[in-house]
């Protein structure tokens, strides 16, 4: 599988652990290698995961960024799961992780991630994207530069356009 990371298509060496109906957070077996576990597994098996060191955590859109704020330095990456295209709560979680809590590691969008979302996900702090498997990742990467000028301030541009403009020239 491939992902977009730092505006480049790369091989993905991470596995995303998803619980089945019969799994519990306390007893699910965590596979060897680099793995991104659900928040509830991190909370239930923290000691085991900390001993490994090769793990990330993922949040669903109905979970809160605050649940990670005191442990951010322990995660190689944090992923936010978008269960469906129309669910925008993950954008808020990403912005909170970057701005309010100062997370500087890899922030990955997983789930129902489509080309049309990437530019806006990038604006709130995502730097990696697991585009839905049935979509062309090579085409999707082009959407990161769909717009040449950003008017509003955000994670990727601290100043709004009117503060960047001098004598009719835009400073990018």
Image: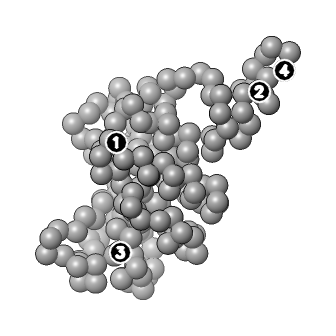
Q: Secondary structure at mark 4?
A: strand
Q: Is residue 11 above or below residue 171?
A: below
Quick one: label 1 or label 2, which is nearer the N terminus? Answer: 1
Answer left or right for 84 relative to 123. left
Q: Is residue 132 visible?
A: yes
Q: Is residue 25 above or below residue 15?
A: below
Residue, disc 3: 40
Can you say which quadrant of the picture contains the N terminus? top left
Q: Secondary structure at mark 1?
A: loop
Q: How is the image coloured?
A: one colour
Quick one: label 3 or label 2, which is nearer the N terminus? Answer: 3
Separation of residues labelled 3 and 2 (CA atoms) = 43 Å
Name the outermost residue toward the right: 167
Nearer the camera: disc 4 or disc 2: 2
The label on residue 162 is: 2
Q: At which x and y percent is residue 73? A: 57, 69
Q: Nearer the viewer, residue 150 or 26?
A: 150
Residue, disc 1: 86
Quick one: label 4 or label 3, which is nearer the N terminus? Answer: 3
Q: At which x and y percent is residue 43? A: 40, 79
Q: Residues within 10 Å of mark 3 (few under 14, many from 20)?
A: some
Nearer the camera: disc 3 or disc 2: 2
Name the outermost residue toward the left: 22
Q: Are marks 3 and 2 in contact (CB under 8 Å)?
A: no
Answer left or right for 141 relative to 133. right
Residue, disc 4: 166
Separation of residues labelled 1 and 2 (CA atoms) = 31 Å
Residue visible at 56% across and 51% down in the picture: 95
Q: Are marks 4 and 2 in contact (CB under 8 Å)?
A: no
Residue visible at 34% across and 68% down in the picture: 38
The quarter of the displayed image where residue 123 is located: top right
């Amino acid at each position: 599988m491939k992902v977009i990371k730092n505006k480049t298509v790369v091989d993905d060496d991470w596995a995303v652990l998803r619980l089945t109906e019969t799994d519990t957070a306390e007893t699910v077996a965590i596979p060897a290698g680099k793995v991104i576990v659900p928040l509830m597994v991190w909370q239930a098996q923290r000691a085991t995961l900390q001993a490994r060191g090769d793990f990330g955590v993922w949040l669903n859109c109905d979970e809160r960024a605050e649940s990670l704020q005191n442990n951010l330095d322990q995660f190689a990456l944090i992923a936010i799961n978008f269960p469906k295209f129309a669910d925008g709560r993950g954008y808020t979680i990403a912005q909170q992780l970057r701005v309010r809590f100062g997370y500087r590691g890899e922030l990955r969008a997983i789930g129902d991630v489509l080309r049309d979302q990437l530019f806006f996900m990038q604006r709130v702090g995502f730097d990696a994207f697991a585009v839905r498997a049935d979509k062309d990742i090579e085409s999707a990467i082009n959407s990161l530069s769909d717009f040449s000028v950003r008017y509003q301030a955000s994670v990727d541009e601290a100043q709004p356009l009117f503060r960047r403009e001098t004598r009719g020239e835009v400073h990018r």
